[in-house]
Amino acid sequence: MTARIVVLRVVPADPPFRVVEIDGQVAGTARDLTDVVRIAYQAGLTHVDLDDPAVVRWVGGGKYTWSTGHAW
């Protein structure tokens, strides 16, 4: 089973962000966990368990990685 939400690697911008894909389509950019949940709800997903790999796949760092070279 593939996760519906994929959060890609941190993009080193000012401020850094991560691209969020839902069902294989770019749904938005996130700067923190709250943004990921907001984007998912805007896409119509009602249950977003950020710790469930069947729901969210984190690429290039986990849910606490929001800058390059620094995992929280």
Image: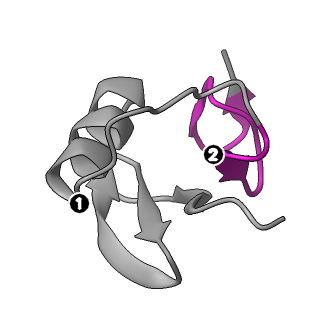
Q: Residue at x 38, y 31 (%)?
A: 32
Judged by depth in the image, the label closer to the viewer, 1 or 2, is 1
**Quarter-of-image position of residue 63:** top right
**Residue 18 lies in the magenta stretch:** no
Q: Tell me if residue 31 comes above or below residue 14 in the rendering.
A: above
Mark 2 = which residue? 68
How many residues crowd around disc 2 within 10 Å: few (fewer than 14), some, or many (20 or more)? some
Residue furthest bottom in the image: 25
Compared across the picture, whether 65 is left or right of 33 comes to right
Q: Nearer the viewer, residue 53 or 63?
A: 53
23 lies above or below 12: below
Q: Secondary structure at mark 1?
A: loop
Q: Work out whether residue 53 can be spotted.
A: yes
Residue range (magenta) = 53-70
Q: Amino acid at mark 2?
A: Thr
The residue located at (25%, 50%) in the rendering is 39
Q: Is residue 69 magenta?
A: yes
Instruction: Give the residue type at disc 1.
Output: Ala
Indicate the secondary structure of the residue bearing disc 2.
loop
Q: Which residue is mark 1?
A: 43
Closer to us: 1 or 63: 1
Q: Position of residue 53 (x, y in %)?
A: 79, 41
Image coordinates of residue 16 in percent, x first then y, are 39, 48
- Residue at figure coordinates x 15%, y 52% from the top left: 42
- Rounded to the nearest angstrom, the CA distance separating label 1 from label 2 is 27 Å
Is residue 72 positioned above or below 28 on the image?
A: above
Mark sitting earlier along the chain (1/2): 1
The residue at 47%/33% (across/down) is 48
